[in-house]
Amino acid sequence: MGTALLYHEDMTAARLLWDDPQCAIETPERLTAALERLRRRGLERRCLRLAAREASEAELGLVHSPEYVALVRGTEALDVEALRELSAQYDAVYFHPSTYHCARLAAGAALQLVDAVLTGAAHNGLALVRPPGHHSQRAAANGFCVFNNVALAAKHAKQSYGLHRAPSISSRMTPGELGVGHGPFLGPHSGSGAWPGVLYFSWHRYEYRHFWPFLRESDADAVGRGRGLGFTVNLPWNQVGMGNADYLAAFLHVLLPLAFEFDPELVLVSAGFDSAIGDPEGQMQATPECFAHLTQLLLALAGGRVCAVLEGGYHLESLAESVCMTVQALLGDPAPPLPGTLVPCRRYGERGEGRWAGRRPHPTLPRSALESIQSVRAAQAPHWASLQHQEATLCLPPGVVRQEEAAPQEEAEAWARPHGALAQGEALTVLGKVLCLVDRILDGQVGSGITAIPAPALAATLDVSIRRGLFHGAQRLLCVAVGQLDRPPDLADDGRTLWLNFRDEQAAALSVFHVSVPLPGATGGFLSCVLGLVLPLAYGFQPDLVLVVLGPAHGLQDPQAALLVTLLRGPAGGRVLALVEEEPKPQLAGILARVLHGEAPPSLGPFSAASPEFTQALGHLRGQLEVHWKMLQVAGEAGDTVLS
Ligand code: X5A
């Protein structure tokens, strides 16, 4: 088990044989650069290496017409002039005598990856392929793409493994479907009802349809038809320069709420790295680390069964780094912190610095990531419970270690002094271990940790852990306390700690850094809290250490606790310390230890919508906080229009 890496050297054979500026960026070096970097980082040898096989013509027939397959087969025998003539009949396509072989290997690799993951030979994986696939259609090549690798993988998964909520195709986003043009063939709208059981998400450079391939059906209001209503989710980026905060906001506020509600059995990723910084086609600004975070977030779905298939990505350095980040995340490594402050882009011009500063926006239209997010949420709201009742309020302005080491007894006693509950016995012994664990995590000697604490000592141990973390050099410490736990009364409200407490009472922002979150019963409420409130705050805060505490009457089911801890690995580079009340659920600590190690959390089970009252209370809380915490925002300001 582990991460599968599919590749075949033959896929470097195809290359452009004549002058065509549009196609010149799709080179064999894309694959060799990515693979070389994986080798150099020691990542390749940590993967299960599988040589790609060719897809059969019957398999290609799952998606493509026999005539088209025969036509592509025929290109093997054509001379350069004939290849050039045929290529000219398509949009942004070139054929080479090896194209058919390469394209069959690319499709075969995608199918094999699905086989590896669905038979249990691997947990997840990446297929490094070319030509890419997502723009190709039933009977046409398009945008460098010949056969639709990910669409074939989706059909194969449904047909051979009988998945019901099969491929949640997170197309062209993350390491996925972002980037350049929209590849609409995959969506259920490409022939009504043709793709039941598939949720298709795509983000793409759109620029109000001024960007290739200029399709009306790439806009946010194209949501699928008939039985496929709501199963096509388009997030058009209407300006270039989108960065880490924008992608993360799109995941937290659009993709993940819908994906968790959908509860897929498999996640297929059209991994287009033309969404990464430096890419000539995408012109976006997301740094490679972002792909580690996006991948890690996707791994919380479908029991971690994530299959990523390379699509675009034309800046060799950016591509190679982003591929490494994706593979690291697939392997379960903690994601490195995201550089810079995380504020989603409100309107054009806020990112005036940098290499794309010169581009002028369209003179009359508002542009921003938030506007795109708002429009897709609005378009999808009728189809998804997790988006309902929200718009009105929201539009307002390295491994886990079981700790054996402990701080010296006298030191533990000194730290325990203010707390009677810690004075002696087991509580003091545990405190010694926790102090040592806090230090080790902050020093980078240990990735994360978990400790079971005797119930009477929990609150005091938490208090001491916070102080110790700040004392030991944490600049910012996030504490997520679940259950009846009070914020230590004399904790300074100075921005060094952010205290989030899930408890039964009313939602309340007692200060910018002290938030009480209502404890939801329904899975939908839990997901809205975590994705819509806790993670945006956590990412915005950029802590050095996250303390998660499951205290008295925490009320979370085991899969919920596991998901919470999994997702909290993101904001602090994996530096999570979980403190769990010793009784009454001994198995919970084991589950949490495994997710801290990078294992996928169990499914939350059937989706149940939050009550309108709950959603409203949460929306109100978000409304109060979003002035300070920009990652909460899902809409531009009213009348936020940019004039030239
Ligand atoms: C796979 C992919 C882009 C084609 C761009 C044509 N295709 N201008 O990224």
Image (cartoon, helix red, strand yellow):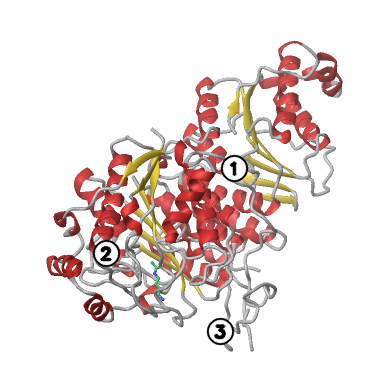
Q: Position of residue 144 (x, y in %)?
A: 34, 69
Q: Residues within 10 Å of mark 1 (few under 14, many from 20)?
A: many
Q: Nearer the viewer, residue 102 or 557?
A: 102
Q: CA distance from mark 3 to mark 1?
A: 37 Å
Q: Give the camera-side residue of 491 and 204.
A: 204
Give the quadrant of residue 477: top right
| Mark 1 vs mark 2, CA separation in Å | 44 Å
Query: Does residue 36 show up?
Result: yes
Which residue, given by chain and number where applicable, does mark 1 sit on? 568
Which comes before the other along the chain, label 3 or label 2? 2
For disc 2, the marked residue is: 99
Q: Which quadrant: the C terminus? A: bottom right
Q: Nearer the viewer, mark 1 or mark 2?
A: 2
Task: Identify the secondary structure beneath mark 1.
Answer: loop
Task: Return the residue at label 3.
Answer: 365
As drawn, is 1 to the left or to the right of 415?
A: left
Query: Which image quarter is the N terminus in?
Result: top left
Q: Earlier in the sequence, mark 1 or mark 2?
A: 2
Could you tell me which secondary element the residue under label 3 belongs to?
A: loop
Residue type at numbered disc 3: Leu
- Residue sitting at x 24%, y 81%: 85
Residue type, numbered disc 1 = Leu
Please say whether residue 297 is visible from this viewpoint.
no
